[in-house]
Amino acid sequence: MRAAPPFSASFSTLSANYDAVLSDVWGVIHNGVAATLEACDALIRFRRRGGTVVLVTNAPRPGDFVKRFLDGLAVPTEAYDGIVSSGDVTRAAIAERAGQRVFHIGPARDLPIFDDLDVVAAPVEDADFVVCSGLYDDTTETPQHYDGLIATMRRRNLLMLCANPDIVVERGDQLVYCAGAIADRYAEAGGRVVYAGKPHGLIYEQALTTAARLRGKALDRSRVLAIGDSIRTDLKGAVAFGIDCLFVTAGIHAEELGPRHSPDALALTGIFAASDVYPKAVMRRLEW
């Protein structure tokens, strides 16, 4: 079994090797309740050295809505140059289905994903396709609550656009289910799913294009670093896209690794080996 990379003490020792960072948001620069100030500071310092930071998030809302959310958590705008969200990628996929009827699974706060797009809301029995942005109530529901709906969608052979491939995210010190948990359940039942976010390539292509535009030139992928806390989305997505990844342990896998501020190296090696993907470097929390 291949050993996990040793823990890096600071991001400053890695940063000189990269021109651009594609950073996860939830789990790296905030936990859903408050900004992670050390991580924000590290990204600010990277930018001051000439680096470009694009936030890449599986949030099922357009990038401008994500920015307003970050502003509310006091994430400094100096920490990033641009945002690419799963919501942005989903909107592009919805736009390709202009004039069709759509059934939405998710909370009302995600409805901006449909703003100014030529689609008509419809019940599942009449819809042409489905957009899943999350659970209707992620404080009380589980993916199993959607089995009846999944059976209906499967019977009608409806395509699902998954606007957030995450299974769970941290909200404070709690884990809550995301759209990916429903989408995976639908796929396991034989349903057709298009995933708009990480670990799938569409969102990385858009993020790399955004970073190149911001820098005014094409980027060498060997000089691009992904940062994230999820093996399933951040690490697997980066490896598949051919870029390095810095894995942060104080995120959704923290409870699997022992004490949050002192993760067990053997446990870390085990979860990398189980997924057969390894990061370039590991940090407990992103800090300069």
Image (cartoon, rainbow, N blue to C red):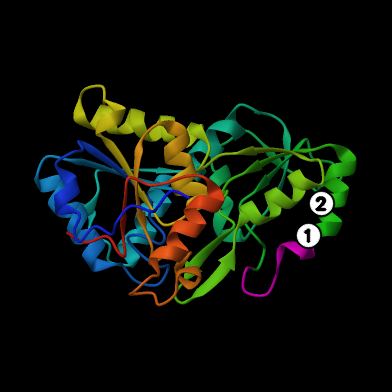
In the rendering, at what x and y percent does residue 277 appear?
47, 44
Q: Residue furthest front?
A: 1
Disc 2 crowd rating (10 Å Cα; few below 14, some 14-19, many 20+) is: many
From the viewer's perspective, is 122 left or right of 164? right
- Visible in this render: residue 122? no
Q: Is residue 73 left or right of residue 142?
A: left
Residue found at the very far right of the displayed protein: 155
**Residue 144 sits inside the magenta stretch:** yes
Quadrant in which residue 248 is drawn: bottom left
Q: Residue at x 48, y 50 (%)?
A: 1
Measured as percent of width and height from the top left, residue 185 is found at 74, 52
Residue 61 at x, y percent in the picture: 49, 50
Residue 150: mark: 2
Q: Nearer the viewer, residue 265 or 198?
A: 265
Residue at image coords 32%, 32%: 210
Label placed on residue 146: 1
Q: At 67% across and 63% down in the image, what residue appears?
A: 136
What are the residue bounds of the magenta stretch? 138-145
Three-letter code, disc 1 = Tyr
Q: Disc 2 residue type? A: Ile
Element class at badge 2: helix
Q: Determine whether, in the image, residue 263 is placed left or right of residue 39.
A: right
Residue 129: image location, x then y, percent: 74, 38
Q: Contact (CB < 8 A) between labels 2 and 1? A: yes
